[in-house]
Image (cartoon, rainbow, N blue to C red):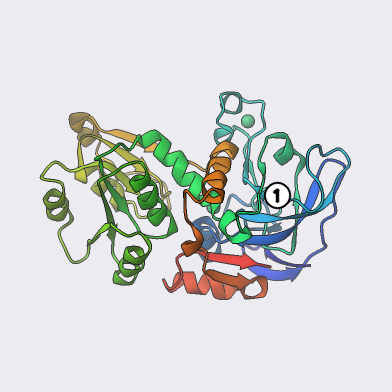
Amino acid sequence: MLAYVYDEQGKLSLKDMPRPTAKNNTAVIKVGACSICGTDFRTYMHGSSKITPPRIIGHEAVGTIVEVGRDVIGFSKGERVAVAPAIGCGECYPCQSGYPNMCDDLQTIGFQFDGGFAEYMEIPEIAFKMGNVNKLGSLISDEEASLAEPTACVVNAQEFLNIKKGDYVAVFGSGFIGCMHAELAFRSGASKVIIIEVSEKRIKQAEELVPGIITINSTEKDLMTEIMDITEGRGVNVAITACSVGKVQEDALNIASKRGRISLFGGIPGSGKGYIDSNVIHYKELSVYGVHASTPLQNKKVLDWISTGSLKVDKYAKNIYPLRDIEKAFEAIKGGDVLKAIIKP
Ligand SMILES: [Zn+2]
Ligand SMILES: [Zn+2]
Protein backbone atom coordinates (compact mmCIF):
# COMPACT_ATOMS: atom_id res chain seq x y z
CA MET A 1 0.00 0.00 0.00
CA LEU A 2 1.04 3.62 -0.50
CA ALA A 3 2.25 5.42 2.67
CA TYR A 4 4.10 8.58 3.64
CA VAL A 5 7.11 7.51 5.67
CA TYR A 6 9.61 9.32 7.91
CA ASP A 7 12.96 7.53 7.63
CA GLU A 8 16.15 7.22 9.70
CA GLN A 9 17.73 10.05 7.70
CA GLY A 10 14.96 12.40 8.79
CA LYS A 11 13.40 12.49 5.30
CA LEU A 12 9.78 12.04 4.35
CA SER A 13 8.76 10.20 1.19
CA LEU A 14 5.95 8.23 -0.38
CA LYS A 15 6.74 4.53 -0.24
CA ASP A 16 5.19 1.19 -0.91
CA MET A 17 4.70 -0.42 2.51
CA PRO A 18 3.17 -3.75 3.57
CA ARG A 19 -0.51 -3.47 4.39
CA PRO A 20 -1.03 -4.01 8.14
CA THR A 21 -3.07 -6.97 9.34
CA ALA A 22 -5.07 -7.16 12.56
CA LYS A 23 -3.66 -9.10 15.51
CA ASN A 24 -5.90 -10.57 18.20
CA ASN A 25 -6.10 -7.24 20.06
CA THR A 26 -5.87 -4.74 17.22
CA ALA A 27 -7.94 -3.66 14.24
CA VAL A 28 -7.18 -2.25 10.81
CA ILE A 29 -9.00 0.68 9.24
CA LYS A 30 -9.13 1.78 5.63
CA VAL A 31 -8.20 5.42 6.10
CA GLY A 32 -11.01 7.72 4.94
CA ALA A 33 -9.35 11.02 5.82
CA CYS A 34 -6.33 12.26 7.74
CA SER A 35 -5.68 15.96 8.04
CA ILE A 36 -2.29 17.62 8.05
CA CYS A 37 -1.41 19.15 11.41
CA GLY A 38 1.00 21.99 12.15
CA THR A 39 3.20 19.33 13.75
CA ASP A 40 3.29 17.38 10.46
CA PHE A 41 4.23 20.57 8.66
CA ARG A 42 7.11 21.16 11.10
CA THR A 43 8.28 17.58 10.45
CA TYR A 44 8.06 18.21 6.69
CA MET A 45 10.17 21.36 7.04
CA HIS A 46 12.65 20.46 9.78
CA GLY A 47 12.31 16.76 10.70
CA SER A 48 11.32 15.64 14.19
CA SER A 49 13.21 14.19 17.14
CA LYS A 50 9.98 12.84 18.62
CA ILE A 51 9.28 10.29 15.88
CA THR A 52 10.80 6.80 16.05
CA PRO A 53 11.69 5.96 12.40
CA PRO A 54 10.86 4.38 10.06
CA ARG A 55 7.35 5.64 10.72
CA ILE A 56 4.23 6.36 8.69
CA ILE A 57 3.17 9.79 9.95
CA GLY A 58 -0.28 11.43 10.22
CA HIS A 59 -2.21 11.47 13.49
CA GLU A 60 -5.61 13.00 12.65
CA ALA A 61 -6.94 9.77 11.17
CA VAL A 62 -10.47 8.59 10.50
CA GLY A 63 -11.52 5.42 8.71
CA THR A 64 -13.66 2.34 8.36
CA ILE A 65 -12.76 -0.86 10.19
CA VAL A 66 -11.92 -3.54 7.63
CA GLU A 67 -10.44 -6.15 9.94
CA VAL A 68 -10.85 -6.65 13.68
CA GLY A 69 -8.97 -8.98 16.03
CA ARG A 70 -11.05 -11.57 17.88
CA ASP A 71 -10.25 -10.10 21.32
CA VAL A 72 -11.31 -6.55 20.46
CA ILE A 73 -14.61 -5.98 22.24
CA GLY A 74 -17.34 -3.63 21.07
CA PHE A 75 -16.06 -2.89 17.57
CA SER A 76 -16.90 -4.58 14.31
CA LYS A 77 -16.09 -4.52 10.63
CA GLY A 78 -17.73 -1.72 8.67
CA GLU A 79 -17.87 0.75 11.58
CA ARG A 80 -16.37 4.20 11.06
CA VAL A 81 -14.04 5.45 13.79
CA ALA A 82 -11.79 8.39 14.66
CA VAL A 83 -8.69 7.66 16.70
CA ALA A 84 -7.60 10.19 19.33
CA PRO A 85 -3.84 10.00 18.74
CA ALA A 86 -2.32 10.73 22.18
CA ILE A 87 -2.52 7.45 24.07
CA GLY A 88 -1.80 7.18 27.79
CA CYS A 89 -0.56 4.08 29.61
CA GLY A 90 -3.47 4.05 32.05
CA GLU A 91 -1.17 3.33 35.01
CA CYS A 92 0.80 6.48 35.86
CA TYR A 93 -0.35 9.36 38.07
CA PRO A 94 -1.47 11.71 35.25
CA CYS A 95 -3.41 8.86 33.57
CA GLN A 96 -5.02 7.88 36.87
CA SER A 97 -5.95 11.54 37.44
CA GLY A 98 -7.85 11.70 34.15
CA TYR A 99 -5.18 13.39 32.03
CA PRO A 100 -3.82 10.67 29.73
CA ASN A 101 -2.45 13.40 27.43
CA MET A 102 0.01 14.11 30.27
CA CYS A 103 1.02 10.43 30.56
CA ASP A 104 4.58 9.79 31.75
CA ASP A 105 4.88 7.26 28.94
CA LEU A 106 2.71 8.90 26.28
CA GLN A 107 2.58 7.12 22.93
CA THR A 108 1.17 8.87 19.90
CA ILE A 109 -0.15 7.66 16.56
CA GLY A 110 2.22 8.82 13.83
CA PHE A 111 5.12 9.04 16.31
CA GLN A 112 5.41 5.68 18.09
CA PHE A 113 2.68 3.91 16.08
CA ASP A 114 2.20 4.05 12.32
CA GLY A 115 -0.19 6.80 11.33
CA GLY A 116 -2.87 7.75 8.88
CA PHE A 117 -1.03 9.02 5.79
CA ALA A 118 -1.50 5.57 4.29
CA GLU A 119 -4.22 3.51 2.70
CA TYR A 120 -4.61 1.38 5.83
CA MET A 121 -3.73 1.92 9.49
CA GLU A 122 -3.58 -0.51 12.40
CA ILE A 123 -5.25 0.66 15.61
CA PRO A 124 -3.06 -0.54 18.51
CA GLU A 125 -4.44 -2.51 21.46
CA ILE A 126 -3.72 0.27 23.94
CA ALA A 127 -5.87 2.71 21.91
CA PHE A 128 -8.89 0.46 22.47
CA LYS A 129 -7.99 -0.10 26.12
CA MET A 130 -7.67 3.64 26.83
CA GLY A 131 -10.87 4.66 25.03
CA ASN A 132 -9.08 6.50 22.24
CA VAL A 133 -11.25 4.95 19.52
CA ASN A 134 -14.45 6.95 18.99
CA LYS A 135 -17.26 5.61 16.78
CA LEU A 136 -18.80 7.95 14.22
CA GLY A 137 -22.46 8.35 13.39
CA SER A 138 -23.84 8.93 9.91
CA LEU A 139 -24.15 12.71 10.42
CA ILE A 140 -20.42 13.41 10.34
CA SER A 141 -18.16 13.00 7.30
CA ASP A 142 -14.67 11.50 7.44
CA GLU A 143 -13.22 14.90 6.51
CA GLU A 144 -15.08 16.71 9.31
CA ALA A 145 -14.16 14.00 11.81
CA SER A 146 -10.47 14.37 10.92
CA LEU A 147 -10.70 17.96 12.23
CA ALA A 148 -11.87 16.81 15.66
CA GLU A 149 -8.41 16.13 17.08
CA PRO A 150 -6.88 19.57 16.43
CA THR A 151 -10.14 21.12 17.65
CA ALA A 152 -9.96 18.98 20.80
CA CYS A 153 -6.53 20.50 21.51
CA VAL A 154 -8.18 23.94 21.32
CA VAL A 155 -10.88 22.72 23.74
CA ASN A 156 -8.16 21.51 26.10
CA ALA A 157 -6.55 24.97 26.08
CA GLN A 158 -9.85 26.80 26.58
CA GLU A 159 -10.91 24.58 29.49
CA PHE A 160 -8.12 26.30 31.46
CA LEU A 161 -9.14 29.78 30.27
CA ASN A 162 -12.75 29.83 31.43
CA ILE A 163 -13.90 32.30 28.77
CA LYS A 164 -17.07 34.05 29.94
CA LYS A 165 -19.83 36.19 28.51
CA GLY A 166 -18.49 39.64 27.64
CA ASP A 167 -14.81 38.67 27.67
CA TYR A 168 -12.36 40.22 25.24
CA VAL A 169 -10.20 37.52 23.67
CA ALA A 170 -7.11 37.96 21.50
CA VAL A 171 -5.59 35.19 19.39
CA PHE A 172 -2.13 35.42 17.82
CA GLY A 173 -2.14 33.61 14.47
CA SER A 174 -4.97 32.83 12.08
CA GLY A 175 -4.24 29.30 10.97
CA PHE A 176 -6.82 26.57 11.54
CA ILE A 177 -5.96 26.57 15.25
CA GLY A 178 -6.27 30.35 15.54
CA CYS A 179 -9.62 30.34 13.75
CA MET A 180 -10.88 27.50 15.95
CA HIS A 181 -9.85 29.42 19.06
CA ALA A 182 -11.89 32.35 17.74
CA GLU A 183 -14.91 30.12 16.98
CA LEU A 184 -14.88 28.53 20.43
CA ALA A 185 -14.31 31.87 22.19
CA PHE A 186 -17.49 33.22 20.56
CA ARG A 187 -19.24 29.99 21.53
CA SER A 188 -18.31 30.68 25.18
CA GLY A 189 -19.77 34.18 25.01
CA ALA A 190 -16.77 36.38 24.24
CA SER A 191 -18.02 39.78 23.10
CA LYS A 192 -14.92 40.70 21.10
CA VAL A 193 -12.48 38.31 19.47
CA ILE A 194 -9.37 39.87 17.99
CA ILE A 195 -7.04 37.98 15.66
CA ILE A 196 -3.50 39.31 15.39
CA GLU A 197 -1.70 38.32 12.18
CA VAL A 198 1.21 39.43 10.05
CA SER A 199 -0.04 38.23 6.65
CA GLU A 200 -2.74 40.16 4.81
CA LYS A 201 -3.69 37.03 2.83
CA ARG A 202 -4.34 35.11 6.02
CA ILE A 203 -6.25 38.02 7.56
CA LYS A 204 -8.65 37.95 4.58
CA GLN A 205 -9.04 34.16 4.92
CA ALA A 206 -9.82 34.41 8.64
CA GLU A 207 -12.34 37.24 8.14
CA GLU A 208 -14.24 35.07 5.68
CA LEU A 209 -14.14 31.97 7.87
CA VAL A 210 -15.02 33.49 11.24
CA PRO A 211 -17.61 36.26 10.89
CA GLY A 212 -17.45 38.92 13.58
CA ILE A 213 -13.75 38.84 14.38
CA ILE A 214 -11.67 41.99 14.61
CA THR A 215 -8.28 41.68 12.91
CA ILE A 216 -5.03 43.53 13.49
CA ASN A 217 -2.10 43.38 11.10
CA SER A 218 0.71 43.79 13.63
CA THR A 219 3.26 44.68 10.94
CA GLU A 220 1.23 47.73 9.94
CA LYS A 221 -0.28 48.97 13.18
CA ASP A 222 0.99 49.38 16.72
CA LEU A 223 -0.43 46.39 18.55
CA MET A 224 -0.67 47.95 22.00
CA THR A 225 -2.44 51.11 20.74
CA GLU A 226 -4.92 49.04 18.72
CA ILE A 227 -5.72 46.69 21.59
CA MET A 228 -6.21 49.55 24.06
CA ASP A 229 -8.56 51.25 21.57
CA ILE A 230 -10.64 48.11 21.13
CA THR A 231 -10.79 47.25 24.85
CA GLU A 232 -11.51 50.72 26.36
CA GLY A 233 -7.98 50.82 27.69
CA ARG A 234 -8.22 47.72 29.86
CA GLY A 235 -6.53 45.05 27.70
CA VAL A 236 -7.87 41.63 26.80
CA ASN A 237 -9.21 39.21 29.40
CA VAL A 238 -7.73 36.29 27.49
CA ALA A 239 -4.75 36.08 25.14
CA ILE A 240 -3.86 32.93 23.21
CA THR A 241 -0.66 32.32 21.24
CA ALA A 242 -1.67 30.14 18.29
CA CYS A 243 1.60 30.35 16.40
CA SER A 244 5.20 29.25 16.89
CA VAL A 245 6.79 32.67 17.39
CA GLY A 246 8.40 33.27 20.79
CA LYS A 247 8.01 37.05 20.66
CA VAL A 248 4.20 36.78 20.76
CA GLN A 249 4.40 35.23 24.24
CA GLU A 250 5.78 38.56 25.48
CA ASP A 251 3.12 40.46 23.49
CA ALA A 252 0.39 38.25 24.98
CA LEU A 253 1.42 39.22 28.51
CA ASN A 254 1.55 42.90 27.59
CA ILE A 255 -1.88 43.12 25.95
CA ALA A 256 -3.59 41.18 28.76
CA SER A 257 -5.76 43.06 31.22
CA LYS A 258 -5.06 42.90 34.93
CA ARG A 259 -6.00 39.37 36.16
CA GLY A 260 -5.92 38.23 32.52
CA ARG A 261 -5.54 34.59 31.44
CA ILE A 262 -3.00 33.53 28.87
CA SER A 263 -2.65 30.27 26.96
CA LEU A 264 0.74 29.44 25.48
CA PHE A 265 -0.79 27.17 22.87
CA GLY A 266 1.83 27.16 20.12
CA GLY A 267 5.09 25.42 20.93
CA ILE A 268 8.14 27.39 19.89
CA PRO A 269 11.31 26.04 18.28
CA GLY A 270 14.47 25.89 20.37
CA SER A 271 14.68 26.08 24.15
CA GLY A 272 11.67 28.30 24.91
CA LYS A 273 13.75 30.43 27.26
CA GLY A 274 13.84 34.20 27.36
CA TYR A 275 10.40 35.44 26.31
CA ILE A 276 8.33 35.85 29.45
CA ASP A 277 8.83 38.67 31.96
CA SER A 278 7.70 37.23 35.29
CA ASN A 279 7.24 40.70 36.79
CA VAL A 280 4.41 41.34 34.34
CA ILE A 281 2.73 38.15 35.57
CA HIS A 282 3.35 39.14 39.19
CA TYR A 283 2.09 42.73 39.15
CA LYS A 284 -0.87 42.16 36.82
CA GLU A 285 -1.91 38.94 38.60
CA LEU A 286 -1.88 37.07 35.30
CA SER A 287 -2.55 33.36 34.97
CA VAL A 288 -0.41 31.67 32.33
CA TYR A 289 -1.34 28.19 31.12
CA GLY A 290 0.50 25.60 29.08
CA VAL A 291 -1.32 22.99 27.04
CA HIS A 292 -0.35 19.79 25.25
CA ALA A 293 -2.47 17.56 23.02
CA SER A 294 -5.95 16.47 24.15
CA THR A 295 -7.78 13.66 25.92
CA PRO A 296 -10.05 11.02 24.33
CA LEU A 297 -13.01 12.66 26.11
CA GLN A 298 -12.24 16.07 24.60
CA ASN A 299 -12.08 14.38 21.19
CA LYS A 300 -15.45 12.75 21.80
CA LYS A 301 -16.96 16.06 22.89
CA VAL A 302 -15.91 17.73 19.63
CA LEU A 303 -17.14 14.80 17.51
CA ASP A 304 -20.52 15.14 19.25
CA TRP A 305 -20.63 18.91 18.61
CA ILE A 306 -19.88 18.37 14.91
CA SER A 307 -22.37 15.47 14.60
CA THR A 308 -25.19 17.48 16.18
CA GLY A 309 -24.39 20.56 14.08
CA SER A 310 -23.59 22.74 17.08
CA LEU A 311 -20.07 23.26 15.73
CA LYS A 312 -19.72 23.71 11.98
CA VAL A 313 -16.35 22.71 10.56
CA ASP A 314 -17.26 21.82 6.96
CA LYS A 315 -15.95 25.20 5.77
CA TYR A 316 -12.51 24.11 6.99
CA ALA A 317 -12.72 20.76 5.19
CA LYS A 318 -12.51 22.01 1.61
CA ASN A 319 -8.87 21.40 0.68
CA ILE A 320 -8.66 17.70 -0.06
CA TYR A 321 -5.68 15.94 -1.64
CA PRO A 322 -5.10 12.32 -2.62
CA LEU A 323 -2.21 10.66 -0.76
CA ARG A 324 -0.02 10.63 -3.90
CA ASP A 325 -0.21 14.46 -3.87
CA ILE A 326 0.63 14.89 -0.19
CA GLU A 327 3.73 16.96 -0.98
CA LYS A 328 1.60 19.32 -3.08
CA ALA A 329 -0.54 19.76 0.04
CA PHE A 330 2.51 20.60 2.17
CA GLU A 331 3.70 23.08 -0.47
CA ALA A 332 0.25 24.72 -0.57
CA ILE A 333 0.37 25.11 3.23
CA LYS A 334 3.88 26.55 2.95
CA GLY A 335 2.69 29.10 0.39
CA GLY A 336 -0.10 30.21 2.74
CA ASP A 337 -2.82 29.28 0.25
CA VAL A 338 -4.29 26.49 2.34
CA LEU A 339 -5.37 26.78 5.96
CA LYS A 340 -6.00 23.09 6.55
CA ALA A 341 -5.33 20.27 4.11
CA ILE A 342 -6.97 16.88 4.35
CA ILE A 343 -5.48 13.76 2.81
CA LYS A 344 -7.91 11.19 1.41
CA PRO A 345 -5.88 8.13 0.47
ZN1 LIG B 1 -2.53 17.40 15.31
ZN1 LIG C 1 0.21 7.08 31.81
Judging depth in this view, the residue of 282 and 263 nearest the camera is 263
Neighbours of disc 1 within 10 Å: few (<14), some (14-19), many (20+): many
Q: Is residue 260 above or below residue 117?
A: above
Q: Quadrant of the C terminus?
A: bottom right
Amino acid at pointer 1: Phe
- Could you tell me residue 103's position as x and y percent? 59, 33
Label 1: element kind: loop
Classify mark 1 as within 8 Å of ligand 1 or not, answering yes or no: no
Residue 93 visible at all:
yes
In the rendered image, residue 276, in percent from the top left (x then y), is placed at 28, 41
Q: Depth check: 14 or 138 in front? A: 138
Q: Is residue 188 above or below residue 61?
A: above
Name the image quarter holding residue 30: bottom right
Residue drawn at x 28%, y 57% is 212
- Residue at the image point whose x is 39% and y is 56% from the top: 179
Which image quadrant: the N terminus? Answer: bottom right
Name the residue rendered at 66%, 55% in the picture.
62
Give coordinates of residue 83: x percent, y percent: 66, 47
Q: Is residue 291 something one can see in this rendering?
A: no
The residue pinned by badge 1 equals: 113
Q: Residue shown at 35%/59% (left/top)? A: 210
Left or right of 18: which side holds 249? left
Residue 69 image offset from top left, x and y in percent: 86, 44
Q: Quadrant of residue 245?
A: bottom left
